[in-house]
Structure formats: structure tokens, C-alpha cells
Amino acid sequence: RIPRPPARMLPFRVVVLALAAVGSVQSFSLTPSWRVPQTTTTQLRSALSQRSSVVAPVLRNERRFRLQAVSLDMVASMDSDTETKEEIASAPPIKYISVEEAKLIDEELMDADTGGYPLATLMETAGQSVAESIYDMYPPSQLDGYTVLVICGPGNNGGDALVTARRLHHMGYNIEVVYPNRVSREPFVGLVNQLKALDVRVNMGMPGVANGYGLIVDGIFGTGFDAEDIQPPFSFMLKQIRDPSLFGTVPIVSIDIPSGWDPERGPPEETEMRIEPDLLVSLTAPKTFA
């Protein structure tokens, strides 16, 4: 297993904000005074259609994005790089949205009269954003041949994870996918077939041996999560990911929210199923308690 990156590169949690609403993301900008509306998402939809981020500043870095500001907690773990500390400390505060607001945003984006973006397009953009974030934090050279294990749930979060797996494969990573409760409709069927065509293994269950894995992508549960969803096989998977004798020391990247967390109330009380990711990629905007 690869060692976790040094403190300057990755603190306990880094929140990456990815725009998962429009095609290829070209650039980001921030309007510090902008607030998420309580009664309408029209302003947010307008901002997204202009391909600008309304939640966090990032810097364009060649073909990918480098974090400019993630969390003020990161300042304490930085070295003597004064310029980078000042960039983070001076960053505007991160804005959060509720689950209901996230649903309204998705509805407007997919509505033929207001957005017209099909679900497959939103998943492609989300998966690309997650893959690019992983590339920035865990480049293939750092994994040194170790496999990325992508765990997919039964909902749209799982679809985002399937796209992430394909994108990472094209970026040069060794990929293995776990997708137990498969959805028998598009775009999910097509996403699985695309991976199989690339000779990426798509398994029904977790690997029996944890050796050889350098990174876990958690795409099990998203904003539609309900505590009742933690049933086998996913309850077993969460325990395996947390078990230090299995995958407990492998870095974790969670998509949108850590699986098992209530996006508005926080982590579960059962610590054996409490995922604490090293990298959290928030889609559109971070959720209240994620």
C-alpha cells in the first residue's frame, strides 16, 4: 500500500468543489457575495450555465485544476510556504447547500424547459471532475502500479463512480470496480459495458484479499441516502473499508458525501461504518454536513 501523502499535500480532509452540471469545465470564478437562494435555483442555474463556480475558488493549472483554497484547517499543517498560506487564509468562505436545494438544482438542469441536460451528461461531467481531482492529489506515478478500487452504489452516485472509473482508466490508472446492486436501465447499463469493453473488471463483491490496492473511490451513497439503505452487502463493504486489517490504511476518496453520512446531520453513530475520507469531491456545492 502506498503511504498517505504528507501533511502539506493532504490534511485530514480536503474538500474539492467540482462543477458537475455542464459539459467540459473551462474555468472557474467566484462571486464572494453570492448566496444560495432559499426559494429558487434560477440564479444558480444561470451561474452554472456560464461555467463559473459559485462556491469556491480554484486556479487553472494547464489541463487540470490545482486547489487554491480548501479548508482553513490546512493552514496549520502547511510548512513555511507563506505565499500558499496567504492564498488559503484569504479565500472567501465556502458556501453550502441543503439536500433539497441539491435536488432542485438537478431538476432544473434536467428539465427540458430550463436546462435540458440528460442524466448521462451530468454523470459524465461529475465523473470527469472526480477523476481530475484524483489525478491532482494521487497521480498514477504516486500509486506506483497499485490498483484503484472503485466501489459503486445502486443510485446516481454509483453512476458517477462508474464514469470516474472509466476516466481514471484513460488517465493511466489500474482500475477495478465493485458494483453489486446493478441498475438495469440506461445510462447505467451502458457505463458497465463501456468498462468491460476496456477490460476493466466489474465485480459483484469486494476482493477477498486487500493486497495490491493503493486507493479506494467511495461512490456507494449520495445525497439520496437514507439510514435504511445500510443493508447487506453495503453494510459489510463499509466495515471492510474501515477495517485496518483489510483496507483501513488505504486512502479514501468520497464522491459528494462520505457514504453512510447523513448530508444534513453528519456521520453515523456506529464508528465501524463511519467513513472518514482523505479526499471529498463535492459536486455542484458541498452539502450541509458533508
Image (cartoon, rainbow, N blue to C red):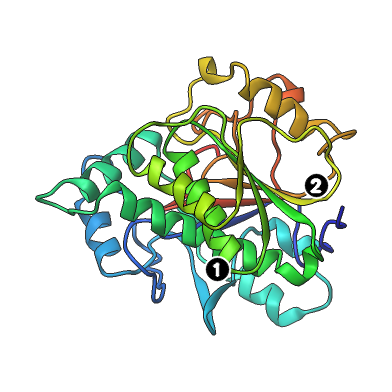
Q: Name which quarter of the figure residue 50 lies in.
A: bottom left
How far across and down, in percent of the image, does residue 131 sit? 56, 61
Residue that appears at 83% across and 56% down: 4
Mark number displayed over residue 204: none
Q: Quadrant of the C terminus?
A: top right
Which one is earlier in the sequence, the residue at label 2 or at label 1?
Answer: 1
Residue flagged by tag 2: what amino acid is it? Answer: Val
In terms of depth relative to the viewer, which is nearer, 9 or 208? 208
Residue flagged by tag 1: what amino acid is it? Answer: Ala
In the rendered image, which residue does mark 1 sit on? 91
Furthest residue to the bottom? 62
Residue that appears at 56% across and 35% down: 179
Q: From this view, report whether residue 263 is shown above or below residue 192.
A: above
Residue that appears at 9% across and 50% down: 113
Q: Residues within 10 Å of mark 2 (few under 14, many from 20)?
A: many
How far across and down, in percent of the image, does residue 23 sit? 33, 65
Helix, strand, or loop for circle 1?
loop
The nearer-to-camera label among 2 and 1 is 2
How far across and down, in percent of the image, does residue 103 sit? 32, 38
Furthest residue to the left? 113
**Is 117 on the left or on the right of 222, as rendered?**
left
In the rendered image, which residue does mark 2 sit on? 250
